[in-house]
Amino acid sequence: MRHLLNTLFILSEDVYLSLDGENVLANRDKQVLARYPLHTLQSIVTFSYAGASPALMGACTSHGIGLAFCTPGGRFLARVSGKSSGNVLLRRTQYRLADDPVASCRIARSMIFGKLYNVRWSIERTRRDHPMRIDAEKFSAASAELRKLLSKVAEETSSEGLRGLEGLGASVYFSVFGDMILNPSAGFSFHGRNRRPPLDPVNALLSFAYTLLAHDCASALESVGLDSYVGFLHRDRPGRTSLALDLMEELRPCMAERFVLTLINNRMVSEKDFSFRESGAVLLTDDARKSFLKSWQEKKKEVLTHPYLGEKMPWGLVPYMQALLLARHLRGDLDAYPPFLWK
């Protein structure tokens, strides 16, 4: 099993990354600020405009280290990828199935089923753990509606139909998501999803979590030999890791959204952690992003039992295991792709 190594996050806008032997150097004004051995890293995410040297990019591709570039505000820009890894037959199968509407729908159906299942379970957990602090009838109604949608997803035979059902499920979920925030008076009220840019603290947290999860999913897919840019539900678009977006759908509720709820409900973030721009955009401050990333890394080390494999593993390996299961399905070892059904 692959070891859960570290992700190196570069938060300062003016830090330039370079290579020295088998080490990553963080530089500012030609001064070395820090040195990190390559063999200890699984991926690098930089929020700096300064960039990275071609030598470092080459070393990352040869060592299988993911290197992603984001804006200081957290918007994904690009990933560095080298020679395709894995069996070329696996990728040819992926491309062939991605061009087949029926096969694409079959795989996407499992992923959307997993998402709505996990969304419903997230609602049920809040209803179970905090019955006196929420509107139980509202949560019960949302859970019942999602249960009906799960039955419809299981029978859907078109990708367009799946997108419609996923949209309905998201609408139901986000209609109660604000009620899952147990201390809204602290400046964390939620009235719907918005992005590019996020317009309130909750959406700023969600967007940042989604960026990190998308990077983890893309790295996992590439590591097992799949092309993260060719998806089954999200269609091809230049520069978009469509398959990573597919894979993260079922992981959003349990890995990103519950994480954000934990930060808010445990008062690990406050209004002072956000920058409110004249344009209406709301962004995390540098210090807040550091705290967020520290908690994110700690969360990835927590151990769970994988619901399909029955093996204990850290949360950080879940995207990797789902990528492996998807690859096994594409190779014909599994009759269907088993989504991650959170328990």
Image (tube, rainbow, N blue to C red):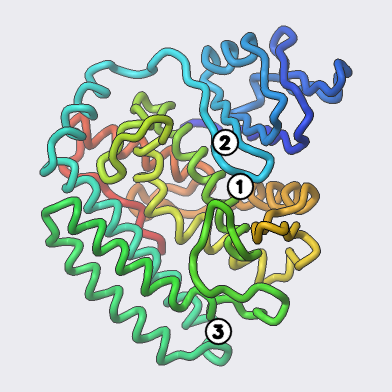
- State the image coordinates of residue 68 (x, y, percent, origin top left): 57, 30
The disc at residue 324 is none
* Of the pair 291 and 184, the residue shown nearer to us: 184
**Looking at numbered disc 1 in the image, what kind of residue is underneath it?**
Lys
The alpha-carbon separation of the residues under discs 2 and 3 comes to 33 Å
Name the element at disc 1.
helix
Classify residue 339 as left or right of residue 37: left
* Of the pair 195 and 28, the residue shown nearer to us: 195
Classify residue 144 as left or right of residue 245: left
Q: Can you tell which of label 3 and label 1 is closer to the viewer?
A: 3
Q: State the residue position of label 1.
A: 301
Q: State the residue position of label 3.
A: 130
Q: Say whether marks 2 and 1 touch (CB < 8 Å).
A: yes
Q: Can you tell which of label 2 and label 3 is closer to the viewer?
A: 3
Residue ID at (42%, 77%): 124
**Looking at numbered disc 2 in the image, what kind of residue is underneath it?**
Leu
- State the image coordinates of residue 198 (x, y, percent, origin top left): 58, 58
Mark 2, Cα crowd under 10 Å, few <14 / some 14-19 / many 20+, is some
The alpha-carbon separation of the residues under discs 2 and 1 comes to 8 Å
Mark 1, Cα crowd under 10 Å, few <14 / some 14-19 / many 20+, is some
Name the element at disc 3.
loop
